[in-house]
Image (cartoon, coloured by chain):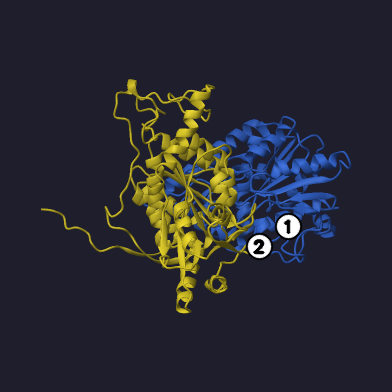
Amino acid sequence: MTVVEFLAQAEDLVSPGLSACQGCAAELALRTAMKVIGPKSVVGIPPGCVAGFGAPGWGLKTGMKVPVCMPLLGNSASLMSGIKQAYAAKDPEVRVVAFAGDGATVDAGFQCLSAAAERRENIIYICYDNEGYMNTGFQKSGTTPHGAHMSTTPSGSCSQGNAAFKKDLPLMLAMQDAAYVATLSVSHIPDFVDKLKKACEVTDGLSYLHILSPCPTGWGTTPELSIEYARKAVETLYFPLYEYSRGTFTISKPTLRAAAKAKPVSEFLAGQRRFRHLCEADALALQEHVDRKWGILSRLAG
Amino acid sequence: MATPRKTKKQVLFAQGNEAVVEGALLAGCTFFAGYPITPSSEIMEEMARRLPRSETGVFIQMEDEIASMGAIIGASLAGRKVMTATSGPGFSLMQEHLGYACMTEVPLVIVNVMRGGPSTGLPTSPAQGDVQQARWGTHGDHPIIVLSAASVQECLEMTVTAFNFAEKYRSPVILLLDEITAHTREKIELPLPGEHEIFNRVVPSMPPEWYKPFEDTMRGVPSMPPLGSGYRYHVTGLTHDVMGFPTQQPDEIKALIERLFRKIDQFYTDIMLVDEYLTTDAEVGVVAYGSVARSAELAVAQAREAGVNAGLLKLKTLFPFPRPFVERLARSCKTLIVPEMNMGQMSREVKRVAASLTHIRTLNRIDGQIITPSQILKAITQG
């Protein structure tokens, strides 16, 4: 069965009529991920865009066809650990999933995520990374890229946007030897599905999946370009796709292809309102950061 | 030649959250660390724009509210005037640090824009459910100063007051706003330079070798040098002696805790701030705070038109509880009404001090809506 056939026949476990912004990649990521994870699962969605657009349910009209709860911003990994441990004795095949934004993952929720990986909790933790607090007014988060204009890192006479660089959670969890770590993009669905299947097969620890999720509203792009920006992020090595398992890093095929003739990061930056103030030097700083990170990753996978 | 004095006040059309920023900058705040949370985020966003413009201004976005408190405590120890802003869920996370700041006597200002709770609650709706948490949220016996504001202009003024109290009494000060006060836009006037007294913490004047960091004095408030300025200064959340080092000695433990209470209690006339409106001849008194006090003011005026002698006691200081003012009003009124957007957190305090003096009625609303003037008017006319 091809990926297309698989996705066509798999049941959509997320209700229609969610109020995500047009072009929101997180909704696509959620629906696709749940098709792979399947109905025998319990999901936690902390405060963030996906909770805000009604995936856990506003009333009985929206929601999911699996049990779903809404933890707090800072406790998804610990709360889902509790659910998994409670189920483990009864039915270890119940998949326990956290579907959390970048703020809930890399900022407020990092401590409990790291601890859950260390305890080798058998949960699937998915981070949809739209690079900011996008449902509360576009404040920067730990994954906001360098130079981005956000409401708490405004560009102006004394600032060129976010001074920090994107926090690399997947690499951190790989260094912690989480059972399975992968980066995913909505522009490369076969790779996306493949990695989710692998995450579901893990029985001895935490799977961490990091999805880059273009956000037209927060990034200042038009809705129809979300997939294109996700693709550009891969092709420019801004967001390399790879896997980590049992001490081995594997660069995924789309990124291997892209690395052969990597495009400049400026192609990813172009057309995004959050980057429009950037001068050449800022773009260069971002390019250098991307090159450095890719250097580390390719050596690890070497 | 003397520069001409600026006498015309600058007028702004601002939100309560923006007025807080104006007040903080006026009071000399140069350091803000925070984590965004509705309905307080505008304070942080405005600070992100304003603070970097000054030479010494520091704005940091932290990874959560626990870290926000850690950063402002550190900066305050280093001599800065500091602030953070949050709402209920974040305020809950701050509680351990709040106790640390009480114990280490670190001046700081926390603005908590209250939203519906418990937990994530109602992010964009007003409430007053954090009143007792502000008083008793952190563990252990401790005094604390809690202020509130009813209008956008008051947001500015009470923020200045919060900084002054924090510096004067070496204490954390909590400014409790509610979503209505924080998000309402109205006209405000920026004070003229020098119009508000600005208090800076007292730094030691003796040579470093004579300095005792937590020495008891008449004021009960020790002087505070910036950490690293040459004065030996041990900082710990453990119960400590006058030198700041941990102690198990009963007499030293007792002396510390008693001083912490005394340094706030003995200055209650300075700290307890209220506004009284038509209370002199009032028969029905209303005790209110925050945005509810504005509904109450209109209700009292309408009651007067209808021939009922009503009066309003608006609490601007919530803790230490303005007991003398409430007692005085209770003695002259046959009924006190306490309207508030919770299940009765401040009416508990009113009952505690005035239950034997008058009849006390509660008026509570917990549905995410404001208490309207007509609701209060109805309660007043029912006596």
CA separation in Å, label 2 and label 1: 13 Å
Q: Which residue is mark 2?
A: A20
**Disc 1: which residue:** A56
Instruction: Give the answer, above or below, for where B126 lies relative to B308.
Output: above
Q: Which chain can be seen in yellow?
A: B
Residue B269 percent location from the top left of the image: 39, 48
Question: Closer to the camera, B254 or B179?
Answer: B254
Q: Earlier in the sequence, mark 2 or mark 1?
A: 2
Q: Where residue A145 sits: x, y (%)?
A: 53, 46
Q: From the image, state whether disc 2 or disc 1 is nearer to you.
A: 1
| Location of residue A229 (image quadrant) | bottom right
Amino acid, disc 2:
Ala
Can residue B34 be spotted in the picture?
Answer: yes
Q: Examine the rendered structure and indicate whether residue B214 appears above or below residue B190.
A: above
- Write down the colour of chain A: blue
Circle 2 sits in a helix, a strand or a loop, which is it? loop
Is B274 placed above or below A111 here? below
Q: Residues within 10 Å of mark 2 (few under 14, many from 20)?
A: some
The quarter of the image holding the C terminus of chain B is bottom right
Q: In the structure shown, which secondary structural element does the residue marked by tag 1 occupy?
A: loop
Q: What label does residue B72 carry, if any?
A: none
Q: Is B129 left or right of A6, judged from the image as shown?
A: left
Please check whether the numbered discs 2 and 1 fall on a single chain. yes
Snapshot quadrant of residue B14:
bottom left
